[in-house]
C-alpha cells in the first residue's frame, strides 16, 4: 500500500537520493531531470536513482526500500537491501514523471510491517517531455542593420529568436563565427508563455553590441550567425542549431563623417554675433563622436557638436579611420550682396554692385587666403600680409580714404563702415564720419580686440579696459564706472548699444535702454551667466549655468522669452530682425519675439542648422534637405530651388537671400534676386569652386594616442 508520510516508528535519518545525471541548480525545484538522464538511458528502464545508507540508524539485510512520487498510488521501484552499507540503486520508469510540473520524489525503508523511515521533505524535480524548439523549429530573426551588412557605424542591434515550447529560464546560445554571445541571454518568466511548453512559437529579443561582432571578425569579412537553445534542465532540440545566416561585415571601414553647419560669426542685418554649432553625423544621419582641432590648437577634442569659435581658421575632423578638413568661412553677406572665397583664393561677388556685389578691378584675378569682412553695404578683404582692400558703398566702408591699408590684424564691420586693429595695437576706422576714431583712442597702442554695434565701435585694451566711440546714444560712450572694469571677457553689440560678460558671471550693458542698453534688475544681479548668445536689433540673449536663457530689451521684439525661458536644452540661438529662433538638443526649434513658427516646422526634430534673413528662415535637416518659412520674397519660398537643395552642408544669409553649399560643390541661391538670390551670372565661377570641405591638413601619422581630450564642448 502507498506510504505518503512517515509513521510514528521512524528510527532512521535518511540520505537524500541522487538522480544520476541530474541537473542543478534549477529554478522552481531542487533538481532537473533531462532526457539524457531519463528517456535516453541505455537500458531503456528510465532514470537511475542512487540512495546512500542512512545518515543515522541501522538497516538490516532484508529491509525493503521503495521509491515513490508524492500522490501516486503505486511505487516507482522496490529493492530488498542485501548489503546495508552499500548504495542502493532504484529506477524511475519511463513515462512516470510528469512534464512541466514539480515532481516530488521520496523513498521509504520498511522491515516487515514497520516503517523505519520516510524521506522528508521529498526531492523536488522538474522534467520536460518536449525540448525547446520541438523538432528543431528554430528561427533566427536578424534586423536589417545586420542582415543588410554590418558597417563601420554599427553600435548595437536587437536580435530576435523564435521557437515553440519556450519556457522560463531557457538559455539562448547565439553563435557568430564560432564565438558565443556572453553572458548568454535567458528567458525571463515575463517573456515565457503563460502555459509552459506551448507549441505556439515565442519570440525572445536581446541586444548584441559592436564588441561582440569585433570578437567574431574574420579575414573573409563575413559574419555567420546561428543559435541554439537549451532549457534549464539541459535539454536541446534534436538538431540543435538554427540555419546559418551569413552577412557581410565592414566594421573597420571608413566612417563616412558628415559635417553640417555654417561657419560665420556675424550677420550685419540682424547684428547678432554668435558662435555657430557644427554637427557630425554618420551615414545613418545619427550623431557621430569625432575629434576636432584647429591647426593652431594642440589637442583634439572629442564631441559630436562643435562650437565654432574660430571660423576663420580651417577645422580638422577625424574619427581614427577618416580625416577631413572644413574650409574657413567662404561665404560673406552684406545687406544686399554676397562675396564668396573660392578654393583657389579668388573672390567672386554678386547681388547689388553698389553694395559690394562687384569685385574691384584690383582684386580680379588675384588669389590669396583672404579673410572677408562686411559692413552693411561694403566688403573688405584682409590678406595674410595684413593688407586690406575695401569696396562697395563709398560712404559706408567701401572707400578707405586716407587710412593706410597695410599692417592690419583684424577688422569689424557695422552700419557705419569698418574699424581695424593694426599689428601695432592701434585702431583706425573708415566709412561714415560718426565712426571716425577720436584722437584719445587713435593714440592708443595697446588694443587687443575690437567690437562693434550698429552705430559705434568698442575696443579692449591689454589691461582689460574697454574704450568706445561712435554714436554717443547708441553705445559710443561707455559709462565711466564700466570703463574702469578690467574683467569683461566678451562683448556684443546691437543697434542700440552693448552687453558685456564679466569673469564673475555678471552682465553689464550700456546704450539705449529700449534696445537692451539698460539691464532689468533681476538680470543685473545674476552671477551665473556663462555666455552671451546673440542679439538682434532691439534685444540681447544670454545663457545661465542651468542652461536657461535670459533676454532683455524690447519685450515685443525678443526681450521677453516667455515659456522658452524654462527650457534648459537650447543648443544655439539665431537672431533675426525682430526676434529669435532657438535650436534645441532634440533637433526641434522654438521662437520668440515678433512672428510665429509654422506648425509643420514645429513638429520637426532633425534640424541641425538655422539661418535667418531679415524676415525669413532656412534650416538644414539631418538628411541634408532644407525647409524654409517666413516672407517668401526674402527666402521663405524654396519652390525654384527645391530640387537643388540636396546634401546641403551649410546655409548663409543676408537681408533678403540665402546661399547654400552642397556636398557636390553646388552653390545654390534663392530669395530676392537683387539681394543675391540670383547668382546665375557668376555660377560658372562658383560651382565646384566654393566647397565646404577641403583636403585634410593633418597627416595620418598624427592620428595617435595621447592627443585626445574628451569633452562635450570645445
Image (spheres, grey):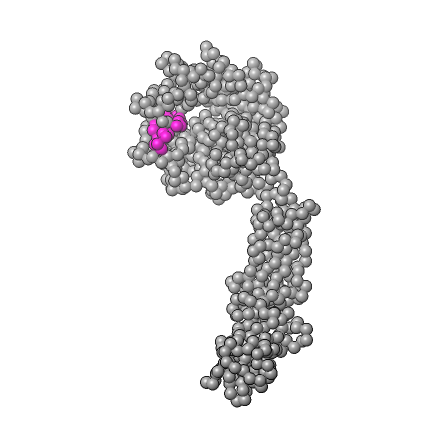
Most common SS among magenta residues? strand
- In reply to whether residue 673 is colored magenta, the answer given is no
Q: Taking 73 as reference, is 383 above or below it?
A: above
460 with respect to 358 (left or right): left
For the N terminus, give its image quadrant: bottom right
**Of 505 and 56, which appears nearest the observer?**
56
Residue interval drawn in magenta: 489-509
Residue 642 in view (yes/no):
no
Residue 227 in which image quadrant:
bottom right
Q: Report the residue at 60% width, 30% height from top.
A: 699
Left or right: 565 in relation to 265: left
Q: Position of residue 109 (x, y in %)?
A: 54, 83
Residue 262 picture location, percent across and down: 52, 31
Q: Is residue 710 visible?
A: yes
In the image, 372: left or right of 578? right
Above or below: residue 644 compared with residue 80: above
Residue extending furthest right?
220
Q: Seen in the image, is 216 located left or right of residue 598?
A: right
Q: Residue 139: name its quadrant.
A: bottom right
Q: Position of residue 558 (x, y in %)?
A: 39, 34
Closest to the observer, 436 or 86 = 86
Q: Residue 658 location in percent, x, y?
A: 52, 30
Is 341 in front, or is 23?
Answer: 23
| Residue at figure coordinates x 65%, y 47% from the top left | 217
Residue at image location 53% in from the left, 62% down from the top: 188
Amino acid at each position: 500500500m502507498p506510504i505518503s508520510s512517515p509513521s510514528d516508528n521512524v528510527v532512521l535519518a535518511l540520505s537524500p537520493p541522487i538522480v544520476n545525471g541530474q541537473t542543478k541548480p534549477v529554478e522552481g525545484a531542487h533538481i532537473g531531470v533531462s532526457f539524457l538522464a531519463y528517456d535516453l538511458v541505455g537500458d531503456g528502464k528510465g532514470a537511475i536513482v542512487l540512495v546512500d545508507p542512512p545518515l543515522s540508524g541501522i538497516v538490516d539485510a532484508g529491509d525493503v526500500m521503495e521509491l515513490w512520487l508524492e500522490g501516486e498510488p503505486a511505487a516507482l521501484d522496490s529493492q530488498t537491501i542485501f548489503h546495508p552499507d552499500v548504495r542502493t540503486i532504484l529506477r524511475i520508469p519511463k513515462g512516470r514523471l510528469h512534464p512541466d510540473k514539480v515532481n516530488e520524489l521520496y523513498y521509504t525503508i520498511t522491515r516487515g510491517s514497520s516503517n523505519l523511515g520516510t524521506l522528508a521533505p521529498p526531492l523536488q524535480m522538474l522534467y520536460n517531455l518536449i525540448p525547446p524548439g520541438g523538432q528543431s523549429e528554430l528561427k533566427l530573426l536578424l534586423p536589417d542593420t545586420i542582415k543588410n551588412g554590418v558597417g563601420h557605424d554599427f553600435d548595437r542591434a536587437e536580435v530576435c529568436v523564435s521557437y515553440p515550447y519556450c519556457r522560463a529560464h531557457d538559455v539562448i546560445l547565439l553563435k557568430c563565427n564560432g564565438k558565443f554571445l556572453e553572458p548568454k541571454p535567458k528567458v525571463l518568466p515575463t517573456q515565457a508563455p503563460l502555459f509552459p511548453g506551448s507549441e505556439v512559437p515565442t519570440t525572445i529579443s536581446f541586444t548584441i553590441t559592436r564588441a561582440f561582432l569585433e570578437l567574431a571578425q574574420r579575414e573573409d569579412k563575413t559574419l555567420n550567425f546561428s543559435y541554439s537553445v537549451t532549457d534549464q534542465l539541459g535539454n536541446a532540440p534534436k538538431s540543435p542549431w538554427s540555419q546559418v545566416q551569413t552577412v557581410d561585415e565592414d566594421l573597420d571601414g571608413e566612417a563616412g563623417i558628415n559635417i553640417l553647419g555654417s561657419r560665420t560669426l556675424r550677420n550685419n542685418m540682424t547684428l547678432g554675433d554668435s558662435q555657430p554649432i557644427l554637427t557630425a553625423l554618420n551615414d545613418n544621419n545619427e550623431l557621430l563622436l569625432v575629434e576636432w582641432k584647429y591647426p593652431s590648437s594642440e589637442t583634439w577634442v572629442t564631441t559630436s557638436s562643435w562650437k565654432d569659435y574660430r571660423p576663420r581658421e580651417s577645422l580638422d575632423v577625424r574619427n581614427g579611420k577618416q580625416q577631413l578638413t572644413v574650409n574657413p568661412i567662404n561665404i560673406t553677406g552684406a545687406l544686399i550682396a554676397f562675396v564668396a572665397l573660392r578654393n583657389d583664393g579668388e573672390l567672386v561677388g554678386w547681388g547689388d554692385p553698389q553694395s559690394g556685389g562687384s569685385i574691384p578691378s584690383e582684386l580680379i584675378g588675384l588669389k590669396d587666403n583672404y579673410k572677408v569682412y562686411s559692413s552693411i553695404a561694403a566688403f573688405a578683404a584682409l590678406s595674410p600680409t595684413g593688407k586690406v582692400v575695401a569696396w562697395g558703398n563709398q560712404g559706408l566702408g567701401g572707400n578707405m580714404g586716407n587710412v593706410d591699408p597695410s599692417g592690419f590684424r583684424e577688422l569689424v564691420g557695422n552700419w557705419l563702415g569698418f574699424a581695424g586693429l593694426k599689428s601695432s595695437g592701434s585702431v583706425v576706422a573708415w566709412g561714415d564720419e560718426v565712426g571716425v576714431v577720436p584722437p584719445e583712442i587713435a593714440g592708443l597702442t595697446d588694443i587687443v580686440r575690437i567690437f562693434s554695434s550698429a552705430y559705434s565701435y568698442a575696443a579692449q585694451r591689454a589691461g582689460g579696459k574697454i574704450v568706445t566711440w561712435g554714436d554717443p546714444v547708441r553705445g559710443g560712450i561707455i559709462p565711466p564706472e564700466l570703463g574702469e572694469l578690467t574683467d569683461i571677457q566678451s562683448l556684443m553689440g546691437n543697434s542700440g548699444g552693448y552687453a558685456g560678460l564679466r569673469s564673475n558671471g555678471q552682465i553689464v550693458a550700456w546704450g539705449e535702454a529700449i534696445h537692451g542698453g539698460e539691464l532689468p534688475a533681476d538680470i543685473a544681479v545674476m552671477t551665473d551667466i556663462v555666455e552671451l548668445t546673440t542679439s538682434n536689433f532691439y534685444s540681447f540673449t544670454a545663457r545661465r549655468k542651468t542652461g536657461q536663457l535670459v533676454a532683455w530689451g524690447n519685450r515685443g521684439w525678443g526681450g521677453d522669452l516667455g515659456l522658452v525661458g524654462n527650457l534648459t536644452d537650447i543648443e544655439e540661438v539665431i537672431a533675426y530682425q525682430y526676434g529669435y529662433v532657438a535650436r534645441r538638443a532634440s533637433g526641434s526649434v522654438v521662437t520668440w519675439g515678433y512672428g510665429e513658427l509654422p506648425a509643420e516646422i514645429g513638429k520637426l526634430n532633425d534640424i541641425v542648422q538655422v539661418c535667418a534673413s531679415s524676415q525669413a528662415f532656412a534650416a538644414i535637416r539631418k538628411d541634408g534637405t532644407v525647409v524654409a518659412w517666413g516672407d517668401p520674397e526674402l527666402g521663405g519660398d524654396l519652390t525654384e530651388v527645391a530640387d537643388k537643395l540636396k546634401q546641403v552642408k551649410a546655409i548663409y544669409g543676408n537681408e533678403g537671400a540665402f546661399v547654400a553649399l552642397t556636398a557636390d560643390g553646388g552653390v545654390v541661391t534663392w530669395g530676392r534676386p537683387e539681394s543675391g538670390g540670383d547668382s546665375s551670372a557668376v555660377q560658372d565661377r562658383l560651382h565646384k569652386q566654393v566647397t565646404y570641405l577641403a583636403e585634410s591638413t593633418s597627416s595620418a601619422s598624427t592620428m595617435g594616442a595621447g592627443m585626445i581630450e574628451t569633452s562635450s564642448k570645445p
